[in-house]
Image (cartoon, grey):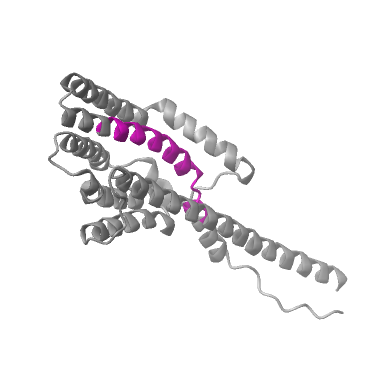
Amino acid sequence: MTNKRESQPADPREIIQWTRRYAQSRTIYFLVQWCLIVFIICVIGLVASLTQQAYTAGNMSLFYTSVVFLAMTFFFFVWISVSHWTAEFVWQVTIWFYGREGFVSPEENNRSKQLPRWVIALIGLMLVYHVLGALLISFRYLQLQYLQPFSAVILVPVLCVLIYYQGLGFWAWLWPLFYGLHAILLLAGVPVGFPSPWYLLNIMVPIFGYGLLAILVGHIYSRYALWKLKTVTRQGLDIYSNDNDEEDVQ
């Protein structure tokens, strides 16, 4: 008779824990959305800058043309945000990337399927708020170098609400945290901004740079969480297999 090797099976709670962490950190879906949003926002920013230059130069025909194009770009952004085609495209890319890993949806993440109506309304308000900021810049009521703090007033709380209702991991909170901190430092006079004529980068780099940083941190952590999940699961299977082998010998 052989002595049974002292071993402790994997804790199911640990498996559930790493499964949840892995699911909360799958960020490719958000990366694809990020790419689409960056493209649209870049267009809006360039048009807003052109509108300001036209108004400053007194070229009213170009100014009104830019305003109309700015409004069209805004409605196109809204359509992209709610379009079934966009959602399907993003989902298909996500499926393609995670195809070999299968699907996982912890119970805590089910709330991300249906956002409250007031949250959806808040997102629309945020879009209108930023378009208002672009118009204020066009009429020179708001300086371009202070657009980022102006944006942070509404973007930070909206991001926090979305992160909470979508049940995302710790990585997502990095975005509003760094974005809000950047606005405070900018208002305090800390040289974290870009000089003229690159003021537009003061909004572009923080909003998309910190977003991309958070997404990449989440993706890296998802790889770690998946590795831990496989390790814990494999450990439990190995222990079960060894115990069966020892029972057969006995």
Q: Residue at x 32, y 30 (%)?
A: 77
Between 245 and 123, which is closer to the camera in this rendering? 123
Query: x, y (%) of residue 188?
Result: 21, 62
Residue 218 against residue 142 in the figure, above or below: below
Secondary structure, magenta segment, majority class: helix
* The quadrant where residue 179 appears: bottom left
Query: x, y (%) of residue 55?
Result: 17, 29
Between 246 and 157, which is closer to the camera in this rendering? 157
Q: Residue at x 50, y 58 (%)?
A: 21
Between 120 and 148, which is closer to the camera in this rendering? 148
**Of all residues shown, which one is farthest toward the front?**
57
On the rendered structure, is 247 left or right of 61?
Answer: right
Q: Residue at x 15, y 37 (%)?
A: 136
**Quadrant location, the N terminus:** bottom right
Give the number of marks.
0
The answer to if 25 sits in the magenta stretch is yes
Query: x, y (%) of residue 12?
Result: 57, 64
- Residue range in magenta is 22-48
Q: Residue at x 21, y 25 (%)?
A: 67
**Quadrant location, the C terminus:** bottom right
The answer to if 37 sits in the magenta stretch is yes
Residue 68 against residue 209 in the figure, above or below: above
* The quadrant where residue 38 appears: top left
